[in-house]
Image (cartoon, rainbow, N blue to C red):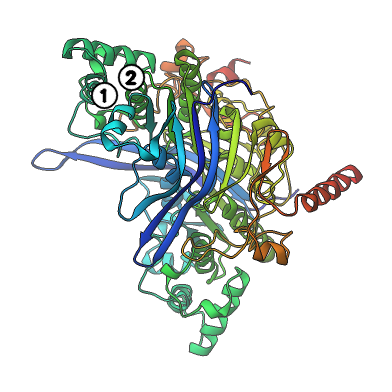
Amino acid sequence: MSKEKLIDVKNLATYFHTEEGTVKAVDGVSFEIYPGETLGVVGESGCGKSVTSLSIMRLIESPPGKIERGEIIFNNKDLTKSTQKDMRKIRGNDISMIFQEPMTSLNPVYTVGDQIMEAILIHKDVNKKQARQEAIDMLTKVGIPLPEQRVDEYPHQLSGGMRQRVMIAMALSCDPQLLIADEPTTALDVTIQAQILELMNGLKDQFGMAIMMITHDLGVIAEVSDRVAVMYAGKIVEYTDVETLYANPKHPYTWGLMHSIPHIEKDVDRLQAIPGSVPNPLDFPQGCKYNTRCPFATDKCREIEPEIEEIEEGHQVACWHVDKLEEAKAKEKKKKEKK
Amino acid sequence: MTEERLLEIKNLKKYFPVKAGVFRRTVAHVKAVDDISFHINKGETLGLVGESGCGKSTAGRTILRLLEATEGEITFEGQNLLELDKRELREMRKEMQIIFQDPYASLNPRMTVADIVGEPIDIHGLAANKKERNERVTEILDTVGLGTEYMKRYPHEFSGGQRQRIGVARALAVDPSLIIADEPVSALDVSIQAQVINLMQDLQKDFSLTYLFIAHDLSVVKHISDRVAVMYLGKLVEVADKQKLFDDPKHPYTQSLLSAIPVADPTYKSDRIILEGDVPSPVNPPSGCRFHPRCPYAMEICSEVEPEYKDYGEGHYAACHLLEQE
């Protein structure tokens, strides 16, 4: 592709050195995000998706956390080598982040306006009055009614959906190039989730920014992403564009996840559950980390960990037995045709 | 089909007082559940859905009398639960159990699994001696897919999915006929949810259980339920057979709720109805139809008169003025 990458993450590894041992939360992930696109990162709790985003923001608490290796190239600079002073210029200005729980990420003792103005005053050369006007403009853009009035209210006076809108207003106030959204709609009701997703999609086009959307919800991923990275136990196991991923998943974990959720548009008698549970990060199995739950696992999987490889153009998978999954898919198809 | 009603709810209300001032006088009421009526047939699963604060959990708890109802009738196997005294109620609870959302908060951390599952057996005197009790506990743990080696362990030693299995085992211990499951899978990881859903379906078949399945995830509810009830702000807006409700939703709220579900298929294009605004406060709900401030089809009458909740054919209940005009 000729387009220039906005952010290029290469072989990133973030470990936490705890008393009980080393937790390899992120263990060698590589991906890139292009300007104006949405990259979805999907995975279950503990797969390392949030730690990946916090590493980009350099918000990993150290100790116990440490970026062990890898590069995060953003605007020709390696963020892993940036000083905290440089990072302060980037955070909220070039890269912004919104979190899952809007109540805990807003300061309860400051008004909404003060909190939006804080970022504007730090990063832009404006006076207080102008900043306040910009805050009101942002509130209008994120669809908050009566912004002149809301700007002086405190977070507790707003509903969950409104708080998330305020978070978005704050994140976008300095016109960032990249917005990292960590489970932005998980705490919200479906009708409010639909509002927020539509808002984010609209603002993305309006501001021309890229979004890194982190979630466990395969429905949300399908809706907003251009490309998707599937994470399991600190690794990206599958990485491709969204249509290919849903039409033709190549990693047994991705395939298993899609079969284990009930689909609203089609009925099945029984869900195909993935057996077992996510392995303990202090005690990952040897070889492929999915081998304890994978129906296709062989001795090879239990010994050697597969590297992620491009098996078709733009489709990367980390699995020794892509062919076995294809066989299973063919069998399933035959069964369906018989019916 | 001859359907036998196991549970029948009539005009159930649950108001919580709002107190204020020095004398803690009641200044208002939160009308969490405000006049709802429905029934559950023997052996079926009724899904109860709605957004946070709509009163679905309160309804579940009021039915079990974990909360005292303000008004109404709850008939279970021909008996009005609200008329039972304490002793009779305890007896009746053997038939009705509950599974909670948070498997981390609903198990006592100081009790072993054997004691957690054994407690209801002791309370209801279902075992003659310790040996018999332990046999029964072993049997139940085996049924929910936990081996006997887990009996002496404490809740913190288990993963979320296993804990929810313990919760299911505890409910099952007294051999109930009705289980109220309050968001039983929403705290679990995606790959684990299917395990618990499958388990609940297997148990339903094996022990002919009846479920009231309370959840906000419509895909899960669609999968597990026979019929579905939709709540909005303390009221039932629509109840129907699952297929009918999802294929032909009659109430505008149900329609927008269904259209808001993100579908796990990037090629799927839905005609989304985006609702304006938030759910209003149940302390001072809107006049007339409670949905009218957000309803895309609201008419004049909607803000004045509350629509009647009635059967629009073959057990498809709804409360909307639009339907009455048709």
Please tell me whether residue A222 is drawn above or below residue B323 in the rendered image: below
The amino acid type, in three-letter code, at marker 2 is Cys
Please tell me whether residue A304 is drawn above or below residue B282 in the rendered image: below
Q: Where is residue B115 in the image (x, y as percent from the top left)?
A: 44, 77
Q: Where is residue A90 in the image (x, y as percent from the top left)?
A: 33, 28
Q: Give the distance between the C-alpha atoms of the residues marked 2 and 1, in whole angstroms.
A: 7 Å
Q: Which mark is residue A174?
A: 2
Identify the residue shown where x is 52% and y is 84%.
Answer: B134
Q: Position of residue B185 (x, y in %)?
A: 53, 52
**Circle 2 SS class:** loop
Q: Which residue carries the number 1 mark?
A: A119
**Circle 1 SS class:** helix
Marks 2 and 1 close (CB-CB < 8 Å): yes
The amino acid type, in three-letter code, at marker 1 is Ala
Please tell me whether residue B134 is drawn above or below residue B77 in the rendered image: below
* Chain for disc number 1: A
Q: Which of A158 and A171 is in front in this view?
A: A171
Q: Nearer the viewer, residue B139 or A181?
A: A181
